[in-house]
Image: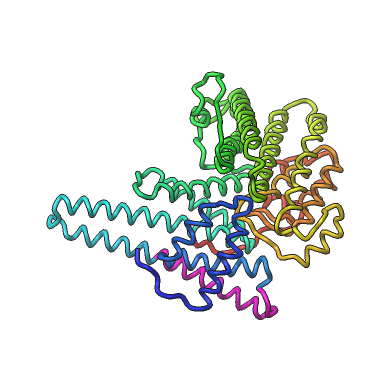
Amino acid sequence: MNARPPRSEPTNRTFDYFLSHASLSLMGFNHRSEFWSRLVPMLCETQDAVLRGVLALSKGFEVGCCGGGVGGLGREREENLVCLRQYNKAIRALCERGVEGKRKRMGRAGMGSTFSQQEEFRDHQERRQITDLQYIITLTCCVLFICLENIIGNYDIALQHLENGLKLLREWMLLAVRGVESERAVLVDVFRRLDMQATAFLNSRKPEMVISNSTGIMADHDGQDEKIQMKFNTLEEAMFALEDVEIRLFYALTITITNTNASSQYSAKQKQQLLSYIATRFGEWKEAFDGFSNRVRKDMMSKDLRLSLILGLHYQTTTLMLAVNANSSGSDDNTFRLSQTPSFTKILQLCRTLINTSSSSSSSSSLSSTQQQQGQKQEQKQTFSADMGVIPCLYFTAMNAADIFVRQEAIDLLRGMIGREGFWDPGTVANIAEAVLRLYPQGVEGVYAEEGILVLERVYCGGGASGGVSCC
């Protein structure tokens, strides 16, 4: 890979802004993200497509989250044009790279029998590396495009980018790689989180990065009831292990029960067995995480403590999600949800702590006054994280708790937030939850109960995602 020529001053300024501001916000609670801290900056030094994608995202972040800086409306329009130009240049660079790779392969094929066996082996290895590099560059740009479209509010286009990226990643996963295993692992982790995020956002969508049969989804069990020993040495290991259980839960909750004998379908009994298995895995994770936390808590930095809290919040939310869905066929679902009020309240407590301790809300000493929150909201810069954090947990509480005061408190916390998390905008989901609370004090009913954010926004708020052009 050849080094890039010197950058212009505006390019340097935008790239420096990405490194010092945008990337730190995009990491969210995962402050050691390999993707944002290592892979993206490394590719920017040699790959024009990634650099252009980063410049577009950096400029979009600055405009979308910080109002475009100094200069008023005219300045903001100019920044939007810069963002769009860099976006188009990134797409053009990806297309040109694909054509160039095809030309190189055709040129070598024309040399035919003039290759010795050793030269043919070296040529095969070089082509394999080129192919791996093309996958890395394209998938990295895909993540950048997803984040940019989410900042803009083009959720339909962001979801289309995600589906295309998952398709390309599955294709790459079928190929053996040598020398880029760490890069592929980083991209798999990023797309797994985006896959789960899209499933939570759309609700009825199945996650794609999980084996889609009952044997595969429980492949680490041999069918016996023995306990799986989990042990974590780092918070990242604990995070990956929890995500592995969560994506299985999201898959299980989107299963359609059928009475047919098709191998790809589930019976009610099979789904119940799967949910029981997932509950066991959650328990094993909690035991291992508690042991890890007790060992290292005194040595944790503040960012590590916040990541530890977000893992606890996601565990609390997903296990409650599992309990609510496992009981959904019961005779009195509302009574069961009412009995879970302490669990919903714990979610609120964890969310309030995380909001109060986040860097975006550091100037706020309390979130007890909604009016005070909304007044401060205009004075503080917004943030944008690529991953899920607090918002989905508050939305789940606002839509599923039986106690209307708990639901209203979740809505108030959403109203006071100034940051967005991937597909999740706190104002949008607060509007949905408030409309549902007003119409259905005992809980959402009917066909729309299982729909995702995009549908519920149109139904209850008369809104919808803005349009756009897909470029991935």
The quarter in which the N terminus is drawn is: bottom left
Q: Is residue 384 above or below residue 236?
A: below
Q: Position of residue 469 (x, y in %)?
A: 55, 64
Q: Give 428 or 30, whichever is nearer the viewer.
A: 30
Query: In the figure, residue 423 lies in which quadrant?
Result: bottom right
Is 119 a magenta residue?
no
Q: Give 337 or 185, whichever is nearer the viewer.
A: 185
Specify the principal SS of the magenta part: helix
Q: Is residue 323 above or below residue 137?
A: above
At a point 73% along the width and 49% down the height, the residue shown is 354
**Colour style of the rendered protein structure:** rainbow
At a point 31% along the width and 52% down the height, the residue shown is 128
Q: Position of residue 404 (x, y in %)?
A: 85, 42
Query: In the figure, residue 112 lies in which quadrant?
Result: bottom left
Is 82 a magenta residue?
yes
At a point 55% along the width and 27% down the height, the residue shown is 229
Q: Is residue 321 left or right of residue 217?
A: right
> Is residue 257 something that shows in the picture?
no
Q: Position of residue 36 (x, y in %)?
A: 53, 57
Q: Is residue 302 above or below residue 445?
A: below
Q: Is residue 85 left or right of residue 402?
A: left
Numbered label tally: 0
Q: Is residue 92 above or below residue 111?
A: below
> Is residue 312 something that shows in the picture?
yes
Q: What residue span does the magenta drawing correspond to?
A: 69-95
Q: Position of residue 289 (x, y in %)?
A: 62, 35
Q: Residue furthest front?
A: 298
